[in-house]
């Protein structure tokens, strides 16, 4: 199975590391839960391009302690396909990146 071009495009659009809203179920856990949101019928995963962007965009939301810095390549490897990543969603011009299902060739 080849990786759709959208995944390569997403990697090119992101810095080497990004911040996501996520947590582990326990200190011993190897499973991470990545928070998604729904706005106007669109489900998306917020992606912040720096710790400073994360801090300013989540201030007062209750997610301030849930920022996880992650390598962009690793993050994309966790995606199943069909997700929408919203880059810096709290800015005036957030950028959506649509990831097609992995069984869909591009």
Image: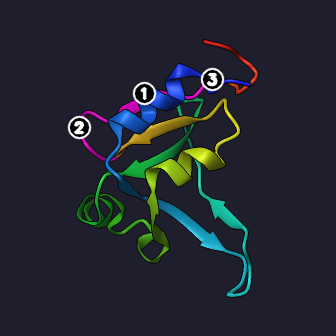
| Residue 97 part of the magenta-drawn span | yes
Mark 1: secondary structure: helix
**Residue furthest top as drawn:** 106
53 to 86, vertically: above or below: below
Mark 2: secondary structure: loop
Q: Position of residue 101 (x, y in %)?
A: 70, 25
Asked if residue 1 lies left or right of residue 49, the reply is right
At horizontal 43% and vertical 39% (from top left) the residue drawn is 86
- Label 3 or label 1, whichever comes before in sequence order: 1
Q: Nearer the viewer, mark 3 or mark 2?
A: 3
The picture quadrant where one finds residue 18 is: bottom left
The picture quadrant where one finds residue 64 is: bottom left
| Residue occupied by mark 3 | 100
At horizontal 45% and vertical 50% (from top left) the residue drawn is 72
At horizontal 61% and vertical 58% (from top left) the residue drawn is 34
Q: Which residues are magenta?
A: 90-100
Mark 3: secondary structure: loop
Q: Position of residue 96 (x, y in %)?
A: 42, 30
| Residue occupied by mark 1 | 9
| Residue 9 part of the magenta-drawn span | no
| Residue occupied by mark 2 | 92
User: Which colour assignment does the render follow?
Assistant: rainbow
Q: Nearer the viewer, mark 2 or mark 1?
A: 1
Classed neighbour count for the residue bearing mark 1: other residues with Cα under 10 Å, few (<14), some (14–19), many (≥20)? few
Classed neighbour count for the residue bearing mark 2: other residues with Cα under 10 Å, few (<14), some (14–19), many (≥20)? few
- Label 3 or label 2, whichever comes before in sequence order: 2
Query: Mark 3–mark 2 contact, CB under 8 Å?
Result: no
Q: Position of residue 15 (x, y in %)?
A: 31, 48
Query: Mark 2–mark 1 contact, CB under 8 Å?
Result: no
């Amino acid at each position: 199975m080849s990786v759709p071009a959208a995944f390569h495009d997403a990697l090119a659009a992101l810095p080497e590391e990004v911040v996501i809203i996520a947590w582990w179920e326990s200190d011993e856990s190897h499973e991470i839960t990545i928070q998604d949101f729904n706005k106007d019928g669109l489900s998306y995963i917020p992606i912040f391009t720096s710790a400073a962007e994360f801090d300013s965009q989540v201030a007062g939301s209750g997610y301030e302690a849930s920022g996880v810095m992650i390598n962009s390549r690793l993050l994309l490897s966790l995606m199943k396909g069909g997700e929408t990543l919203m880059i810096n969603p709290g800015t005036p011009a957030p950028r959506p990146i649509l990831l097609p299902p992995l069984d869909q060739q591009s």
